[in-house]
Amino acid sequence: MVKWNQYWKRYSLSKAERWLVLQRDKIINAYLDKIVLSEKQIIEVGCGYGSNIRLLRRKRGDVRCYALDNSPVAVNLVRREISETIVADCRNTPFSQDSFDLVFSAGLMEHFKDETPFLKEMKRILKREGYLITFVPARFSLWKLYQLIHFGLWQHGYEKSYTYRSLKALLIKNGFLSVEITGIDPFSINGVVMKLLDITMPAILERSLLKSGYTELCIVGKKMLQPKKKLV
């Protein structure tokens, strides 16, 4: 917890990260548009700096935004714009069952050795026809190579990466239907160039030849609903 508080105190959004936020935003908005409600309840779980939930709050008039993080420093930063931001463990939230139309996270699930408690809680707070969207590190990229060079001494401690197949299997195992899996930043080439030169520019590569060859994989899930029992 201390490390995360210190990290968010020093954090500033680079141009490369800003580009990544915008790529996530496109996916989140596409699924928000599928929800036919005048006001959609959405939450960013493990919000950190809250780049995506803040952006949604500014751009859309049809959403009520919530955010959650385990770091009080992060929560105080986001609460300046989104009053419904709370300090809580994402594996045990204070929200009632079926609270949200869309639940999303970025850079969160990979920090858990066992993802089941997290996914179980996300399923509980997600509405029956809602969407779960999570962004996690992909297996084959320059970003993963950077981690390996550090011999596991990653600044946030334990962190894993995923393949297309393992990510889909994980959601199905925990009671979700896999709606879509897509990738952001093929092999991390776009992000690395932008970060090194401190610029934002059109993507050099749009698509990877490998399903898992991206900086991030994004999986979209829906609850796997149990058939209703027939009355005898």
Image: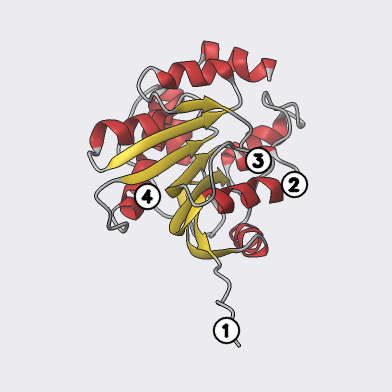
Which of the 4 image quarters holds residue 46?
A: top right
Q: SS for tag 3?
A: loop
Residue at image mark 2? 114
Residue at image mark 3? 91
Amino acid type assigned to the residue bearing label 4 in the image: Ile
- Identify the residue shown where x is 48% and y is 44%: 104
Q: Earlier in the sequence, mark 3 or mark 2?
A: 3
Which of the 4 image quarters holds residue 160?
A: top right
- Identify the residue shown where x is 56% and y is 28%: 69
Rendered view: 218 above or below 82 = below
Q: How far apart are marks 3 and 4 (CA)?
A: 24 Å
Q: Position of residue 13 (x, y in %)?
A: 42, 21
Residue at image mark 4? 27
- Identify the residue shown where x is 42% and y is 38%: 190
Rendered view: 58 above or below 203 = above
Residue at image mark 1? 230
Q: Which of marks 3 and 4 is nearer the N terminus?
A: 4
Rendered view: 161 above or below 51 = below
Q: How far apart are marks 1 and 2 (CA)?
A: 35 Å
